[in-house]
Image (cartoon, coloured by chain):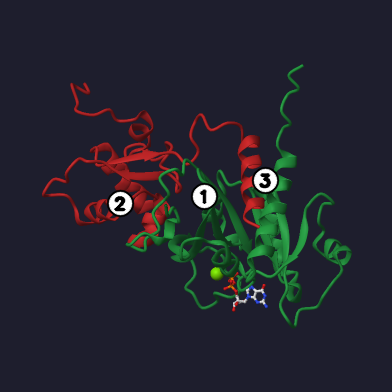
Chain colours: A green, B red
């Protein structure tokens, strides 16, 4: 019996017939922080992307400077899929964290379990706007520091202070190219999500 | 206006989520699309046809169809809504209505993630 979804002859990676419950989370952070890498590491299907409309109203100069202002352009949203139990499938959407993506962000975040915010210690400041957006959406989140070779190493204490993290917000270090650490990041997020959900009523 | 003795039942959320009432709930990007046995009419549009052909071997979510067909999610929702109304696709929500509490879902997710270690 071969139930691996990505081995069907078409290469499409159809959903396993038992898949009944589909959950999603958002992987976010600044450009180049490792969102696509983490999703590729975890996904059981080759990562896919959609081109999503984004209304550009910002006049700020930033990494897409040069695009005409006040136009509708598109941004690629990567995603991948991970079957965690026979009937339970997790989708991961790599969503850029800039303010100008807000409508798109809201659409993807609706119904999401939470967000994994990736941080690069070479440019911590780039993550502030991302975390503000996640908080505005009311999504529970965990922060994963993606370690790059030339990146300064900070203690968790220093990072928490710089990022102004709530004491309950999970903070971990991970290498988005490694499966185990990436799964640990998802586990930390899911555990955190669980603490925020109402406890079952005591039946007695 | 009477619905008459139609051949199929159109789920209420599709009627209210259709193009005439764009503010109603639309298909989720993770809604699952399943091809039915209903044959396509000869005059079926090419994009509707591509979507049905993609779904011939198995089920996929709206967003996966969008990616494979190189279409925006919104356009795929539009096509899928039409095809569901005409009985060529079944759609189902990402979380079954009897799927248990949020808490039990996240607990099961955790068990699953830990088992992947
Ligand atoms: N050293 C190191 N490099 C990484 C890591 N994650 C991603 N990269 C590299 O950083 C670059 C940008 O990653 P990418 O996933 O495309 O970033 P995205 O823009 O957030 O999707 C790629 O060249 C990756 O190979 C990591 O954890 N460690
Ligand atoms: Mg990317």
Residue A197's place in the image compared with B41, above or below, is above
User: Number of callouts in the render?
Assistant: 3
Mark on residue A138? 3
* Residue behind mark 2: B55
- For label 2, count other residues whose C-alpha is less than 10 Å away and answer few (under 14), some (14-19) or many (20+): some
Alpha-carbon span between mark 2 and mark 1: 24 Å
Q: Quadrant of residue A185?
A: bottom right
Chain hosting mark 2: B
Q: Which of the 4 image quarters holds residue B33?
A: top left
Identify whether B21 is placed above or below A159.
above
Disc 1 packing (10 Å; few <14; some 14–19; many ≥20)? few
Say whether disc 1 or disc 3 marks the residue closer to the N-terminus: 1
Residue drawn at the location 70% of the way across and 45% of the way down:
A193
- Indicate left or right for B88 with B31 as reference: left
C-alpha separation, residue under disc 3 versus residue under disc 2: 35 Å
Residue A177 visible in the current orientation:
yes
Residue ranking furthest to the front: A1
x, y percent for residue A88 = 53, 45
**Pointer 3 local density, CA inside 10 Å: few below 14, some 14–19, many at least 20:** few
Quarter of the figure that contains the C terminus of chain A: top right
Q: Position of residue A26 (x, y in %)?
A: 59, 55
Label 1 belongs to which residue? A107
Circles 3, 2 touching at the beta carbon (< 8 Å): no
Seen from the viewer's position, the closer of residues B18 and A185 is: A185
Distance between the Cα atoms at labels 1 and 3?
13 Å
Q: Secondary structure at mark 3?
A: loop
Which of B30/A30 is in front? B30
Is the CB–ligand 2 distance for label 2 below 8 Å?
Answer: no
């Amino acid at each position: 019996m071969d139930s691996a979804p990505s081995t069907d002859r078409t290469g499409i990676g159809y959903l396993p017939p038992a898949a009944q419950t589909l959950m999603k989370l958002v992987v976010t952070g600044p450009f180049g922080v490792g969102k696509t890498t983490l999703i590729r590491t975890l996904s059981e299907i080759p990562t896919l992307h959609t081109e999503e409309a984004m209304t550009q109203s910002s006049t700020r100069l930033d990494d897409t400077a040069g695009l005409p202002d006040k136009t509708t352009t598109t941004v690629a949203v990567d995603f991948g899929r991970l079957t965690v139990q026979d009937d339970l499938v997790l989708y991961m959407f790599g969503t850029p964290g800039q303010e100008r993506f807000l409508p798109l962000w809201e659409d993807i975040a609706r119904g999401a379990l939470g967000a994994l915010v990736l941080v690069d210690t070479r440019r911590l400041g780039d993550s502030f706007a991302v975390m503000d957006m996640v908080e505005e959406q009311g999504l529970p989140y965990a922060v994963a520091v993606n370690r790059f070779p030339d990146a300064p190493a900070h203690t968790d204490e220093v990072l928490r202070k710089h990022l102004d993290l709530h004491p309950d917000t999970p903070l971990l270090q991970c290498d988005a190219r490694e499966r185990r650490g990436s799964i640990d990041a998802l586990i930390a997020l899911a555990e955190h999500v669980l603490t925020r959900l109402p406890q079952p009523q005591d039946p007695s | 206006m009477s619905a008459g003795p139609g051949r199929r039942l159109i789920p209420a959320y599709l009627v209210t989520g259709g193009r005439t009432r764009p503010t109603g709930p639309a298909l989720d990007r993770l809604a699952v699309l399943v091809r039915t046995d209903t044959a396509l009419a000869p005059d079926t549009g090419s994009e509707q046809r591509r979507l049905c052909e993609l779904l011939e071997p198995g089920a996929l979510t709206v967003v996966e169809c969008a990616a494979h067909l190189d279409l925006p999610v919104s356009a795929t929702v539009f096509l899928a809504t039409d095809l569901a109304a005409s009985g060529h696709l079944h759609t189902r929500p990402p979380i079954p209505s009897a799927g248990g509490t949020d808490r039990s879902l996240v607990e099961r997710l955790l068990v699953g993630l830990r088992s992947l270690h």
